Image (cartoon, grey):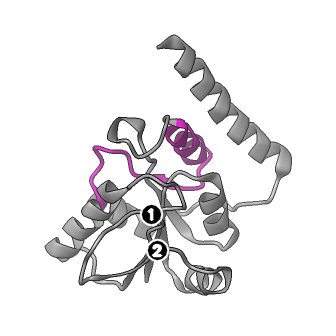
Amino acid sequence: MILITLGTQDKQFTRLLDMVQKEINKGNIKDKVVVQAGHTKYESKYMEIFDLIDREKFSDLISKCDVLITHGGVGSIITGLQNNKKVIVAPRLAKYDEHMNDHQLQITENFSKAGYILPLYENDDLGKVLKDIKSFKPKKFKSNTSHMVKLISDSVSYTHLRAHET
């Protein structure tokens, strides 16, 4: 099963679900797909879509999924890693009005560089990333507060600097 989490951001993130639907239509995704869509409105007869999921159901879905595809939220990424899941991260981008800024891009880059996740950037091919995830061996996640603080602060610092450049 593939679990997709879009978080609770009040902005739409249909771009990711469009990519998934495209791969379903091509026959590249045959697994059951369950989506925690938050405030994103989307209809598909091939995906089981929930607005929000309570903690118990979410924990159950995380434990059952083979792959987690998520937005670039730190909490969602860490939840997948703590549950030893292969994680694909698609950051929400400001230019599509999916978020107010591009901090999720930097978070995704940092987790990818550290070897924890596979990124799905806007121009990447989800079909290729789904093939790559099969052989991907993520770095074993250890709850290491100082390392996580560094990952997050590097992301925030980069975003802060970029905001002042424009």
Disc 2 to disc 1, how far (Cα)? 6 Å
**Residue 139 or residue 26, whichever sits in front:** 26
State the residue at coordinates (80%, 59%): 143
Q: Residues within 10 Å of mark 1 (few under 14, many from 20)?
A: some
Q: Residue furthest left?
A: 26
Horizontal relation, residue 75 to residue 92: left or right: right
Q: Are marks 2 and 1 in contact (CB under 8 Å)?
A: yes
Q: Residues within 10 Å of mark 2 (few under 14, many from 20)?
A: some
Q: Which residue matches tag 1?
A: 39
Q: Which residue matches tag 2?
A: 51
Establish if 122 lies above or below 88: above
**Residue 128 or residue 97, whichever sits in front:** 97
Q: Which residues are magenta?
A: 103-127
* Residue 105 lies in the magenta-colored region: yes
Q: Residue 102 appears at what percent x and percent y?
A: 49, 36
State the residue at coordinates (67%, 26%): 157
- Amino acid type for the residue under numbered disc 2: Asp
Q: Residue 66 appears at what percent x and percent y?
A: 49, 79
**Residue 15 or residue 12, whichever sits in front:** 12
